[in-house]
Amino acid sequence: MTTTTKPGDTKTGANAALEARRQAAVPRGVAVQLPVYAAKAENAELTDVEGKRYIDFAAGIAVLNTGHLHPKVKAAVQAQLENFSHTSFQVVPYESYIRLAERLNQMAPTKGPRKTIFVTTGAEAVENAVKIARAATGRPGVIAFSGGFHGRTLLGMALTGKVVPYKVGFGPMPADIYHLPFPVAYHGKTVAESLEAIETLFRADIDPNRIAAMIIEPVQGEGGFYPAQPELLQGIRAICDKHGILMIVDEVQTGFARTGKMFALEHAGVQADLVTMAKSLAGGFPLSAVTGRADIMDAPNPGGLGGTYGGNPLACAAANAVLDVIEEENLCARADEVGNLLVGRIKGMQRQNSLAGIIGDIRQLGAMVAMELVQGGDANKPDAELTKQLIARAAEKGLILLSCGIRSNVIRYLAPLTTSDGLLNEGMDIVQASLEELVAERAGA
Ligand SMILES: Cc1ncc(COP(=O)(O)O)c(C=O)c1O
């Protein structure tokens, strides 16, 4: 017989019972990082079904820049729920979709005038951006980068520059996708090498006149929080302009104030042709968007774009409130404060004798902060094991952390931008104590 656990139940063993049910009912392909089950959450804190409290530095994978259930977002969704929850915009449209499109058209870092379509997930935004680019150019090819992540749908997976676990067993991949090396200074890979690789690709593999688009994250998210240097983005812009290729910038993880600007591309002084957005756009409600040059966006025929749930009314209400909150609470400036606090604490640990050599690199763009864990200070000795242990130990002490990176050795910090300094410090105290324990245990082993 199946027993149910209701929100508010705080039974000892409730997590274990749910974990057993998950393993029996849900395929292992949906991997779960922590076998603790959410009961309630508010701003940067979460309580599990056993009543244990956690500070949340994962924010549902970069979705909650405005925190769990921001009062204004909650009120906007509740108000919408009093009216209607779904009509399908393609059947009976509504104003909140149009208002949100108008607002993104004002702010997206693309050449103007602009138009916007709403869909539901980040991968779906990416798929639609590629469809629009192909329709607008009449060309098939798409160039992406190694280490990049663009989702788990067939095309998203094909564009993603990491084989394990995303592509294993799922082939054949869609055709006409090419990958270039992403420059990472810490790993000795330069921007010049990447730009040269584009020219090599055009000489060796594909005529640039057959390329519809190049897609890039302004900071690689899942790949390890590696910022794309402005020279790379500017170089890509120039190559796209030279060959009539469209530049798609994937801001799914970087958007909505996370990096200290509304969009990370603004740091590079470059404008894209198409921008994909999702995650923190709607504060926890499933919504994604593609904004782009109006003439490009209008290339697909009527009926060629959309989806039953795309631009759901509850999600649009949430997103309009999220944009208000970002402005009213000055979250772009707050992102820099959050990032500086976190980096100050990580640098302190890096200098600490007892933790010598384990924090190889620290990266920051606003509050998009990461630390790369290595052995003996060697960039070529990634410490994926310590990364995994840190996440587990921090969780025991009440902190939810998230890893990333092509070598699985990066801790990424994604605390809501609405987290207080007190909570940020409390979370970082847990990171420090966990690392101290783990290093001491290793030395004693
Ligand atoms: C840059 C980027 N693009 C696309 C996606 C896919 O988004 P979703 O998981 O909502 O499909 C992600 C998800 O992490 C992402 O970080």
Image (spheres, grey):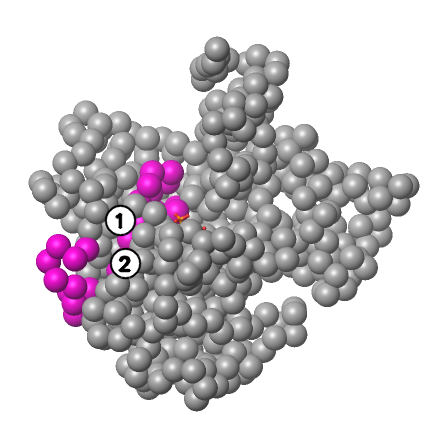
Does the image show residue 143? yes
Residue 209 in percent (x, y) is at 30, 83
Query: Which residue is disc 1 drawn over?
Result: 119
Residue that appears at 39% across and 46% down: 280
Q: Is residue 263 above or below residue 122?
A: below
Q: Quadrant of residue 276?
A: bottom left
x and y percent of residue 80 in the render? Answer: 21, 31
Find residue 340 and report its horizontal and vertical position in percent: 58, 53
Range of residues picked out in magenta: 279-305
Is residue 303 highlighted in magenta?
A: yes
> What residue did someone put label 2 on?
128
Residue ID at (58%, 52%): 404
* In the image: residue 121, left or right of residue 225: left
- Image location (x, y in percent) of residue 189: 61, 75
Q: Relative to 205, say whether 438 is above or below.
A: above
Badge 1 amino acid: Val
Residue, x 16% and y 57% (percent of image)?
304
Q: Secondary structure at mark 2?
A: helix
- Report the front residue among 415 and 425: 415
> Are the two marked residues, 1 and 2, in contact with CB atoms closer than 8 angstroms?
yes
Quadrant that contains the C terminus:
top right
Decide whether residue 425 is among the magenta residues: no
Q: In this rendering, does residue 260 appear at all?
A: no
- Give how far apart the Cα atoms at labels 1 and 2 are: 9 Å
Q: How many marks?
A: 2
Disc 2 marks a residue whose amino acid type is Asn
